[in-house]
Image: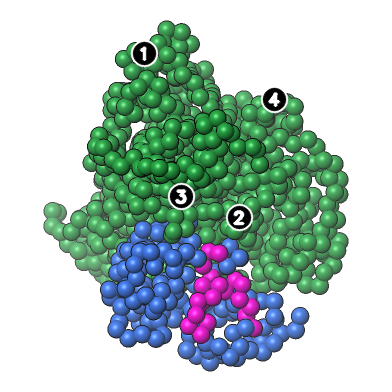
Amino acid sequence: MGARTINFTLNGEPVSTAIEPHRNLVELLQRYGLFGARESCGQGLCGCCTVLVDEKAVSGCLYFAVWVDGKSVTTVEHLDAGGALSHVQQAFVACGAFQCGFCTPGFVLMAHQLLKHYPDPSDENIRHYLAGNLCRCAAYPEIVEAVKQAAKTAPTRTGQPR
Amino acid sequence: MNQVGREIPRLEVGAKVSGRAEYTHNLCLPGMLYGKIFRSTVSHGRIRSIDTKAAASLAGVHLAVTGEDIRKLIPEPYYGPAFHDQPILALDKVRYVGEPVAAVLASDSHVAEQAAQLIAAHYDELPAVYDEVAAMQPDTLVHDALRPAGTFTDLKHLKGRKGTNVALDYHLRRGDADKAFASADRVIEHTFKTQQCLHLPSEPHVAIAEPGDGRLTIYTSNQTPSFIRIEIARLFGWPENRVRVKVPYLGGSYGAKVYVKLEALVAALAMLARRPVKIALTMEEQFYMITKHPTTFRIKSGVNKHGRIVARACEVYWNGGAYADIGPRVTQKSGFTAAGPYDIENVSIDSYALYTNRTPAGALRGFGVPQLVWAYESHTDLIARELGIDAVAFRRNNILRDGRPQASGTVLRDAAIGEVLDALASRIGWDAPFDRGSGALRRGRGVAIGFKASISPTTSVAVVNVSADGSIYLYKSTVDMGQGSDTAFAQIVGEVLDVKAEDVRVVAPDTDVTPYDMGTLGSRSLFHMGNAARLAAEDARAKLRALATEAGLPAGTNYPAAEIFKKRYGMQAGNVIGTASFVPNYTPPDAQTGLSDNVTPFWMVGGAAAEVEVDTETGHVRILRLVNAADCGKPINPAVARTQLSGAAIMQLGFTLSEAMQLDGGQVTNASLADYKIPGIGDIPPMEVEFVAAEQHSGPFGAKGIGETGTFGVSPAIANAIHDAVGVRITELPITAEAVLRALRAKAGRPLEDA
């Protein structure tokens, strides 16, 4: 199938590329050396491939690359663009909220989005919001702690996850 | 500053939270081809023909390969850690649905996938055997003859054996069980079963082979780089140094990635294609790679009127699937402890590794021990009930204590079994009354304890390098797949050399650089490689002192390493290399009695207590509390160790309540995360973990392995709690709501009809 040219914003930078319509967002990101979004279950069930498109979390394994045309894409690699880990990333470190780390980018991105909706989340909010992310190492107790800690240390401003 | 005991975050935290950690998954080499596997659609059959023409002629396909093509490259293309029984691609026969039959290579993975679908194979179907007990009969033979690997002396007698599906049988005889049963006041017998389930790491198996100049470099997500090097070299008839195996971080494993998985296939394909080849499995394909043994366990105990177990007989049948993988080792090693952590004078154990027409089974977080604990702790609970003795008191009365011989004859040392039981009883408030529920919702409590002999005999080698500025490297082939081994070793080396753990550079496994290690498996690394790292650091420290003397510095002074180097070499130059290998003693079990005075260098001990609520109208079980207690010796990093314990317990919770591979005519019918339910964040009960005060005197700074311990007690603790709540006994995993409801209705005399 023929490639289509798409223009989009990737981690704050405008980019343009030609890509075939059957390729997914994870494949597109790999072209830019971005491997933080990882295809795992291939069905949009595990959250390992989470990417923010126009600030909304999508499953990169089910999201066609051509759909980002004209949109803004943010990956986990952008969260420390300012030189320091985001408050969510710092909380994940402090709480030891992962083991193998393969699912971690997905949890971190979802936790950012969660905290935008629930600045002071309950356990129930956290469990509900992160139900679409699976961690086979089962660092779940630590992940809940990390989200709560991140809520306490969140920068007062909202908007683009930092 | 003490490094051991510090709760530092894992060394690689920054890389992992920022998505930049290196996994095999990330790697792409120039000219690399992607391989896709064409798999068998039948459980058992002779291969009549494989037609790859259409696949090979699809635009963009580089090569289509069958087992016969590989046989031209490698005359004996069979691999395996215990038996050389697994062909790289099927030869002559297929033995399970999903077995790799052919492979296609293309520079675009989508093209390879499409081409694989164009392959057609025809088989003369043979009868298949799926059940481990049925496989004891030689009616359907999965293999024509046994092919033990020459490396294990205790398997040599099996070579060429025909007419059987029994890959290995292990027998233990201690005392006289038959006589003791005859004189026992009560003899109680049960049968328990476990299901086929699997590891399902988030990162499915992935491997790359890069050929060049008569050599191969293999990049792989694998827990046993040294073994991969040896096995690939053996297949090609090469010396070890022509194969280089590099392993970055693993995206989870839990035993899925031990020994050869995709490595032989990518190596053969890369040699045939003369280009780098990458194969990355999908989540679905993991169901056709490696699983956990289903088991049938018949257990019988004789008890006297004082509530002492005087005899126990165990028959365990391990469903190993089509290829032995590490199953024979699981059969034997777990066989040592099949009678449980109790002081029993008369024990007989018969443990059988069986071939069947299923996806092969290997080791999954416990090397078979969780299956055993499920049976012996459910059984022990039932005995206590039948005798009318409190379940904890009954266990205390029979428990195995330090200084007493275990069933194998090996005397127990540094195994805090009693302490673990006490911790569980105390945490759950065993002796205190609790809310037993009302109406349709009934509550109950259960407890279970288990133990495990470490894998022995095994070797770990470590190298510590002190650079001219005093900075430290540790070279080891232990694979950090999330358990935090890099961090623990840095703390150990830092402790010896008096540097901060964070400043120790821990080099990722690369067999051209890092020395031999038997494998990152069986919770052996902290003990074995931890000891090797400690000894290598001590060796480096001694050599540094010798260098100071050589440089003319006065003895007994504490010059910084950098000054010693500068004084000796006149500038910032040189290295000090400390090395050590660690291999604990081991006595192989007697061929007749299965007894040995030294089966393991250390014992792992863990248990669980659960409080559950059962909905008697639906059979749904809610876990109200899950307590895990363990003996990890003196933890090197308590924070990381705690997450190992709780992570293992949650994983086992999945195997207890929901996870099961469903088979229909040998075909897995739920091979996806949509249909095979693993625990999510909403499934986690309130959890508590506790390490009892303990010390492993032969371990590095008193520590021992913990990776598997959290799985031991979970399943039987929950079954025991359900029995306590509603009076029904579940004897087969998983404990689904349907299973509980069926048991409730059967008990009420209104059995549910079969679905």
Which chain is disc 2 placed on?
B
Q: Is residue B135 left or right of residue B619?
A: right
Q: Which of the 4 image quadrants contains residue B434?
A: top left
What residue sits right under mark 2 in the picture? B675
Q: What shade has chain A been given?
A: blue
Mark 2 to mark 4 CA distance (whole Å): 33 Å
- Tell me if residue B121 comes above or below residue B448 in the rendering: below
Q: Residue at x 34, y 18 (%)?
A: B308
Mark 3 to mark 1 CA distance (whole Å): 37 Å
Question: Horizontal and vertical percent for residue B710?
Answer: 39, 45
What residue sits right under mark 1 in the picture? B304
Q: Residues within 10 Å of mark 3 (few under 14, many from 20)?
A: many
Q: Residues within 10 Å of mark 4 (few under 14, many from 20)?
A: some
Q: Are marks 1 and 4 in contact (CB under 8 Å)?
A: no
Q: B640 or B262, which is in the foreground?
A: B640
Q: Which mark is residue B651?
A: 3
Q: Residue at x 52, y 17 (%)?
A: B592
